[in-house]
């Protein structure tokens, strides 16, 4: 791969290494909250975190940020691990923020003892009112000056379960006049009598993100804690806790999150799509999830290539989803075997009147013109073949190089044929074309001297295998859903899935072993992959991406 210049995080890391910071050690973490499946935005973060460690001889932890018992689930934990591995990365340690609950609790007591945290009985509304607005200072809580002893006693009783949800919180005593709202005595702990998927009913108080994340980083001696730009305003608090607790000084560094056109990425919204049945599940091929992309036919390498191409920036931007499609198309162009499939509810039958009825010819057709090593496959040919209805026109415009009455075309890998007669039913619809083939025009040994401009794909009628073919389009109709007013579900594309009947060549019956994990090009139609719904009796294909490149104009 060609050399690209260092991104700003790599520059920073190289300066740290050169300066001997942390003994030149690089230790990153990928910290998903197990409240949904990973999406392409997470892939950016995964490639960044694991990529940095790989590049600089460091390590990466997988840390589940599981401090919110209500929305989290082991189903998500398992899917996250599978997705990270599928993308091609292996973590050094598998950790859970919940493993640190005891340690975090001790940190909290330490801050209380230092007079830097207090128990507040104010309601959520009262606390919000105390915080004021960014342009004017906030007001101290009436509970701010409780004694250390009283705070310790109350916090221990919070932990012991003496109070109901919401009755009290623990707050850091920072600065109610700070221009940074996150420093106006932020919450550290809240009471939540909820069952946690790992710690069970041991805890009824749970740490807030800001009190769990940086401390977890410090416990793991993470050197570079990479997160998205929303957390810039949290950084002073991240540093404040580390300083006051005198723990390992992990450094938070922010980068621009991935936003994609025609795509929503927040897990809350993706969950709505799943729960409300707009898609068939987290792995629906229209979803921007890793599992959806995988089912759609994306490869790990194409996703990594995409993440590499978009780079790492310090400013929010919106990436054209066409770039993602470009990356998989480029790869499949090199690797996907070509096969023929007629995707048409009403394909047209072509009868070759001068081809012997009992003749069964096996043609050898190259698998991939981009890759001679891919070899050839055998494709049966016979007197009757299916073609796409759109490859015939009774009254063609100029420059129509496919089939029309009296016209000639090449059947891919086979012969040149000439259309002699058009057969119609009573309603006037074309039901069959009667053609002659030119015996000397066989591909590879053509001595006919005839030149035709068009080549079309076909499938032998007696050998054709039926398949269900799922054609996907964007799930949303607007380029930047986050810029629109109202509910994003108003912009769901009603035609994002179209199911068509396919007649495919018989080599596809053994596709699992034949093609790379079921990824193929249907010639002239696009790149497809075998779907998980496929059975021996019924092949099901997903269109991964169309052939035409709409991105790199
Ligand atoms: P969501 O908004 O989808 O719920 P999140 O940030 O709450 O995202 P987490 O599970 O906490 O989801 O994310 C794990 C890591 O992945 C975090 O470090 C986060 O910064 C990163 N991440 C999440 N979304 C993106 C994105 N769109 N682009 C880049 N990184 C992302
Ligand atoms: Mg998060
Ligand atoms: Mg979230």
Image (tube, rainbow, N blue to C red):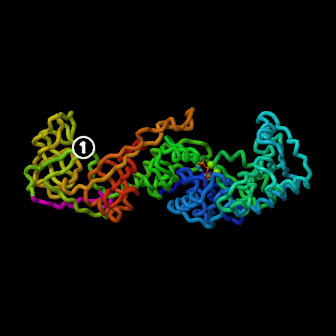
Residue 216 place in picture, x, y as percent: 71, 59
Q: Residue at the location (56% across, 38% down)?
A: 482
Q: Secondary structure at mark 1?
A: loop
Q: On the image, which quarter does residue 488 sit in? A: top right
x, y percent for residue 463: 21, 57
Residue 444 versus residue 435: which sits nearer the camera?
A: 435
Q: In the rendered structure, does residue 101 fall within the stretch colored magenta?
A: no
> Magenta stretch: residue 367 in it?
yes
Q: Nearer the viewer, residue 81 or 255?
A: 81
The residue drawn where x is 47% and y is 58% is: 300
Q: Where does label 1 land, which residue?
A: 346
Residue at screen point 20% across, 37% down: 393
- Decide: is 315 above or below 519: above
In the picture, which quadrant includes the C terminus? Answer: top left
Label 1 CB less than 8 angstroms from ligand 1: no
x, y percentage for residue 356?
Answer: 8, 56
Bounds of the magenta span?
A: 358-371
* Foreground pick, 511 / 35: 35
For the question of whether residue 233 can be seen, the reply is yes
Residue 58 in which image quadrant: bottom right
> Is residue 300 found left or right of 486 in the rendered image?
left
Q: Is residue 467 above or below residue 261?
A: below
């Amino acid at each position: 791969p060609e050399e690209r210049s260092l991104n700003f995080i790599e520059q920073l890391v190289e300066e740290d290494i050169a300066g001997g910071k942390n003994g030149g050690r690089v230790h990153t973490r990928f910290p998903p909250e197990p409240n949904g499946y990973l999406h392409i935005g997470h892939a950016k973060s995964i490639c960044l975190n694991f990529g940095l460690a790989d590049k600089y001889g460091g390590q990466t932890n997988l840390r589940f940020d599981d401090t919110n018992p209500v929305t989290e689930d082991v189903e998500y934990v398992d899917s996250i691990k599978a997705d990270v591995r599928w993308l091609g990365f292996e973590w050094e340690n598998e950790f859970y923020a919940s493993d640190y609950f005891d340690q975090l609790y001790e940190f909290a007591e330490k801050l209380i003892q230092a007079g830097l945290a207090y128990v507040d009985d104010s309601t959520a509304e009262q606390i919000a009112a105390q915080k004021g607005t960014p342009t004017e200072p906030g007001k101290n809580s009436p509970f701010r000056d409780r004694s250390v002893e009283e705070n310790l006693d109350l916090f221990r009783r919070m932990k012991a379960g003496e109070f109901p949800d919401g009755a009290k919180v623990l707050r850091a005593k920072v600065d109610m006049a700070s221009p940074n709202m996150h420093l106006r005595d932020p919450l550290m702990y809240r009471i939540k009598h909820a069952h946690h998927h790992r710690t069970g009913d041991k805890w009824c108080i749970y740490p807030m993100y800001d009190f769990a994340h940086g401390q977890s980083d410090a416990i793991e001696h993470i050197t570079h804690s990479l997160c998205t730009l929303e957390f810039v305003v949290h950084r002073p608090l991240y540093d404040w806790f580390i300083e006051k607790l005198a723990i390992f000084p992990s450094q938070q560094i922010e980068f621009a999150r991935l936003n994609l056109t025609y795509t929503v990425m927040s897990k809350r919204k993706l969950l709505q799509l799943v729960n409300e049945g707009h898609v068939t599940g987290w792995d629906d091929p229209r979803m921007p999830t890793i599992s959806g992309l995988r089912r759609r036919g994306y490869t790990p390498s194409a996703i990594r290539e995409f993440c590499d191409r978009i780079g790492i920036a310090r400013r929010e931007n919106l990436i054209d989803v066409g770039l993602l499609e470009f990356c998989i198309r480029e790869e499949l162009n090199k690797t996907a075997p070509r096969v023929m499939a007629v995707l048409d509810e009403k394909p047209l039958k072509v009868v070759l009147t001068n081809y012997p009825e009992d003749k069964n010819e096996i043609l050898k057709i190259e698998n991939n013109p981009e890759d001679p090593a891919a070899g050839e496959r055998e494709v049966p040919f016979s007197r009757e073949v299916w073609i796409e209805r759109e490859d015939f026109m009774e009254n063609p415009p100029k420059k129509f190089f496919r089939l029309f009455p009296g016209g000639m075309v090449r059947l891919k890998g086979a012969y040149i044929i000439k259309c002699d007669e058009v057969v119609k039913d009573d309603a006037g619809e074309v039901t069959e074309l009667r053609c002659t083939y030119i015996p000397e025009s066989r591909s590879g040994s053509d001595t006919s001297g005839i030149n035709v401009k068009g080549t079309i794909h076909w499938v032998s009628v007696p050998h054709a295998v039926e398949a269900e073919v799922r054609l996907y389009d964007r799930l949303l109709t607007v380029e930047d859903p986050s810029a629109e007013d109202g509910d994003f579900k108003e912009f769901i594309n009603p035609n994002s899935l179209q199911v068509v009947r396919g007649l495919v060549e018989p080599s596809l019956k053994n596709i699992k072993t034949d093609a790379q994990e079921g990824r193929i090009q249907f010639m002239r139609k696009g790149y497809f992959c075998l779907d998980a719904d496929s059975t021996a009796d019924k092949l099901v294909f997903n269109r991964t991406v169309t052939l035409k490149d709409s991105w790199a104009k």
